[in-house]
């Protein structure tokens, strides 16, 4: 449940804060760059991260002045490090916290470092993640705050791009979270997160101020127990800066974790959270996850961002509701388990890969009636099951397979293809791919529609007069072939692994294209097509 937002007075500015959890340890979470307390909880990965922190602490969250739900201030009055320290003290005073651990993520690190050195009596311990001591390289610190802006000119060029694309779905998300940057739902959330966290001018000003900070001289004055964590292949901030700080803060512990996402709530967040809990509480999270072989299916709506912009919020919300109803209906039909509805798609698991493929095909077929296209990725592997959630490399692989799929395509890994041998499902080889973040090369296959178990009678436009069948799609020809065999709509639906409603829609389109009306005319058309199928092709 999303916590209540309250306000603390810091000078003449209201600072928004939230408190979650009832642990004995007070933990102040200092976010990087810009933030929005409410939107943190709308992204499941972020919400889960915060809930884990709150499971062993009284977690104190806030938006710094000028951002999120706190009072907006003129760009030229954005807070200095000193003012931000005042804001932290005001929030701690408001919640009755005399002494707390500080967790500073990314750009929040320098302020936390300065706070720990300035108010040692109020800091129990310090954790920094993906942070830095200085913005630009100099003397003994030959690294910039980010990989992409190592000089003032680089920074201005980067900030210019940020200003031009602020709040757009493609707003350089790959810099912050490359593992999820290609997925539409994350693009939309990130775009909205930026828009609701700060104006373009404020966001740029905060970034510029971050580059101007330099806490190198403060590091030896930090005497609180300190842990500094960095992901080895951080996409935005080099790990060298964290190593530098760990060498200069007395007794600091440095932990380097595998991963490329700079955003700490994406990627393997459990590895980070386990280290954080161990450091702060002295106990490591004990988890005994169920490991099972499962088939994971990801889907998403193709071009969802453009469609959402075209329809507007109200109509897009209605369309998503209809889409979710279709997805849930197909999941129920094919015994799938919904793990998470992902805004414009779904993550689901199945106890059999064939059912996953047929469910994905059913979804692709059904949603066309809503005027949208869906794509799907399917992979089978060992998954960790925790409280209804799934994790593990198999889930990441499924997401990467989805990212490779084309519109209307059900793309599967070679593992899935091999496991459904004998099912009658036909595949088209799509070749070898390197899936981002997944070792090795992967051969992927597209599951062909309508070719399972009972192949449809062969009817093609070449077997009849062009003016009769040339307007029909291959799927419509397939449906008419079954009609010619005398199958009912229910039997056709079973053969094609689609719903009766989909078959009825196909037939409606067929009769409209062929200008056929009335039951007798439809029977006659079926007989005619049956004769056409049995006749030899005409010589060209």
Image (cartoon, rainbow, N blue to C red):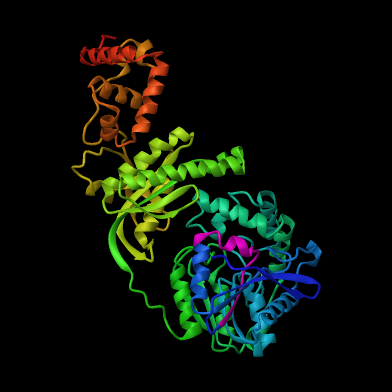
Query: Percent x, y for residue 443?
Result: 31, 47
- Whether 310 is drawn above or below 203: the answer is above
Query: Percent x, y for residue 142?
Result: 61, 72
- Whether 60 is drawn above or below 355: the answer is below
- Whether 255 is drawn above or below 353: the answer is below
Q: How many marks?
A: 0
Q: Would you say residue 379 is visible in this rendering?
A: yes
Q: Would you say residue 444 is visible in this rendering?
A: no
Picture quarter with the C terminus: top left
Query: Percent x, y for residue 517?
Result: 39, 14
Q: Quadrant of residue 65?
A: bottom right
Q: Is residue 29 magenta?
A: yes
Residue, x 69% and y 56% (percent of image)? 159
Q: Is residue 404 magenta?
A: no
Of 251 and 283, nearer the camera is: 283
Of 491 and 418, nearer the camera is: 491
Q: Quadrant of residue 526?
A: top left
Q: Residue pushed farthest left?
A: 422
Left or right side of 302 for 379: left
Give the residues in magenta.
26-44
Query: Percent x, y for residue 184?
Result: 51, 48
Residue, x 65% and y 65% (percent of image)? 33
Q: Quadrant of residue 93?
A: bottom right
């Amino acid at each position: 449940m999303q916590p209540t937002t309250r306000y603390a007075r810091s000078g003449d500015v209201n600072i928004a804060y939230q408190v979650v959890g009832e642990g004995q340890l007070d933990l102040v979470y200092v976010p990087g760059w810009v933030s929005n307390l409410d939107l943190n909880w709308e992204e499941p990965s972020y919400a889960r991260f915060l809930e884990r922190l709150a499971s062993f602490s009284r977690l104190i969250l806030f938006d710094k002045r000028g951002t999120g739900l706190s009072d907006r201030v003129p760009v030229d009055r954005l807070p200095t490090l000193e003012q931000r320290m005042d804001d932290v003290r005001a929030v701690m005073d408001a919640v009755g916290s005399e002494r707390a651990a500080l967790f500073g993520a990314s750009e929040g690190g320098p302020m936390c470092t300065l706070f720990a050195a300035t108010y040692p009596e109020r800091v129990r311990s310090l954790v920094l993640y993906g942070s830095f001591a200085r913005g630009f390289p100099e003397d003994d610190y030959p690294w910039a705050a980010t990989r992409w802006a190592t000089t003032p000119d680089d920074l201005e060029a980067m900030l210019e791009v940020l200003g031009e694309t602020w709040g757009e779905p493609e707003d350089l998300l790959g810099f912050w979270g490359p593992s999820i940057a290609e997925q539409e739902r994350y693009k939309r959330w990130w775009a909205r997160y930026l828009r609701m966290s700060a104006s373009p001018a404020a966001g740029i000003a905060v970034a510029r101020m971050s580059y101007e900070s330099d806490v190198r001289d403060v590091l030896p004055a930090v005497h609180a127990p300190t842990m500094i964590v960095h992901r080895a292949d951080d996409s935005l901030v080099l790990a060298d800066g964290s190593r530098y700080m760990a060498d200069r803060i007395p007794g600091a512990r440095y932990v380097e974790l595998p991963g490329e996402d700079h955003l700490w709530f994406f990627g393997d967040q459990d590895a980070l959270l386990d280290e954080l809990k161990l450091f702060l509480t002295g106990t490591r999270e004990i988890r005994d996850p169920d490991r099972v072989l499962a088939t994971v299916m990801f889907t998403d709506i193709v071009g969802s961002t453009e469609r959402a912009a075209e329809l507007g919020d109200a109509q897009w919300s209605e369309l998503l509701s209809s889409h979710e109803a279709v997805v849930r209906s197909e999941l129920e039909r094919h015994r799938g388990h919904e793990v998470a509805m992902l805004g414009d798609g779904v993550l689901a698991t199945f106890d059999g890969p064939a059912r996953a493929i047929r469910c994905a095909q059913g979804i692709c077929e059904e949603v066309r009636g809503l005027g949208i296209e869906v794509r799907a990725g399917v992979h089978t592997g060992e998954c960790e099951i925790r409280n209804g959630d799934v994790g593990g490399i198999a889930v990441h692989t499924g997401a990467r397979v989805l990212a490779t799929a084309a519109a209307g395509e059900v793309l599967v890994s070679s593992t899935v293809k091999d496991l459904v041998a004998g099912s009658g499902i036909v595949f088209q080889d799509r070749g070898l791919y390197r899936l981002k973040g997944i070792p090795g090369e992967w051969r992927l296959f597209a599951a062909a529609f309508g070719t399972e178990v009972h192949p449809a009678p062969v009817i093609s436009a070449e077997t009849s007069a062009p003016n009769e069948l040339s307007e029909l799609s291959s799927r419509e020809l397939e449906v008419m072939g079954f009609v010619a065999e005398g199958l009912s709509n229910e039997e056709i639906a079973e053969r094609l692994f689609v719903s009766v409603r989909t078959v009825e829609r196909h037939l409606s389109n067929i009769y409209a294209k062929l200008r056929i009306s009335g039951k007798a005319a439809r029977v006659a058309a079926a007989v005619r097509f049956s004769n056409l199928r049995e006749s030899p092709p005409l010589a060209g």
